[in-house]
Image: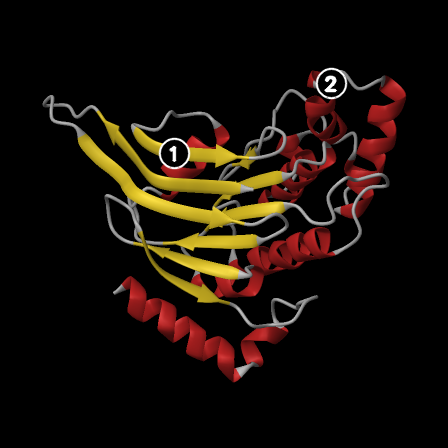
Amino acid sequence: MILARQLTKTFPGPDGVAIHALGPLDLDVAQGEFVCLVGPSGCGKSTLLRLIAGLEQPTSGVLQADGRQPILVFQGDSTFPWLTVYGNVEYPLKLRGWSEKEREAAVVHQLSLVGLSRFAEAYPYQLSGGMKQRVALARAWVSDPEVLLMDEPFGALDEQTRVALQTELLRLWEGPQQPGSPTARKTVLFVTHAIDEALALADRVLVMSSAPGRIIKEVRVPFARPRDAIQLKRDPRFGELAYELWQALK
């Protein structure tokens, strides 16, 4: 679903010297695969997601993202403060021209999946940080994207809430999709600084170098699905893989 070959991105610097932010980078993500990217701050992880989403244009190389327009979920609060929870989740469906009846069925279903049905008429200022991220998940999922790009969506949350939302994301991704959904599982590219989060979620973890970011290591995650983000940490292999990733980051 995502393919990059010798992809690079440079930005103009303040002194007229170009800043080489990314690449050359090669990347393959298969349909229905969950891939996590880890790497030091400033290595170009977010830049890569923005390129795939079409928010930035590559400087050179080849980049291909199949299917419908990828959906990008940002770190922190991305809810619209002037809309209710229902209105936030409904918003992308309005943009796509869905009928009111279709929108209502999809939003009600999605809110029930993330446990927000009784908060449908609440506004973001009335919600906790974790609940706002549930809204963001529901809004990303409701229009059934084929590719989901997630840029540290749980990075600003406390540990307990973060693990709870990892479990929620796994349940959404591993479980049954909406009726009539064309994809069995969404293709997910997930950026995180947390190695334990990457191992809990991913089929593969890709380690990026410092800028200009390149992929320097791939770790395949052997744990069977469905997964429990908490129970996994009791497996000795979890610690071994975490150590391997830390060594790569060093």
Mark 2 crowdedness (10 Å alpha carbons): few <14, some 14-19, many ≥20: few
Q: Please tell me which residue lies in front, 113 or 99.
A: 99
Q: Residue at x 49, y 66 (%)?
A: 220
Identify the residue at horizontal 59%, vertical 40% (top origin).
Answer: 148
Which of 121 and 204 lies nearest the eye of the viewer?
204
- From this view, report whether residue 51 is shown above or below residue 205: above
Q: Is residue 244 left or right of residue 149?
A: left
Q: Height in image: 34 above or below 4?
A: below
Dot 2: element: helix
Q: Position of residue 24 (x, y in %)?
A: 28, 42
Q: Residue at x 61, y 66 (%)?
A: 229
The image shows residue 31 at horizontal and vertical percentages of: 61, 47
Tag count: 2
* Secondary structure of the residue carrying numbered label 1: strand
Q: In this view, does 96 lie to the left or right of 247?
A: right
- What residue is at 30 percent from the left and 53 percent from the top? 40
Q: Which residue is the site of mark 1? A: 62
Residue 155 seen in this snapshot: no
Residue type at mark 2: give it: Lys
Residue occupied by mark 2 = 94
Q: Which of marks 1 and 2 is in front?
A: 1
Residue 189 visible, this orientation: yes
Q: In which quadrant of the rendered image does the C terminus lie?
A: bottom left
Q: Does residue 69 sit above or below 192 in this rendering?
A: above
Q: Classify residue 163 by image quadrant.
A: bottom right
Q: Is residue 137 left or right of residue 235?
A: right
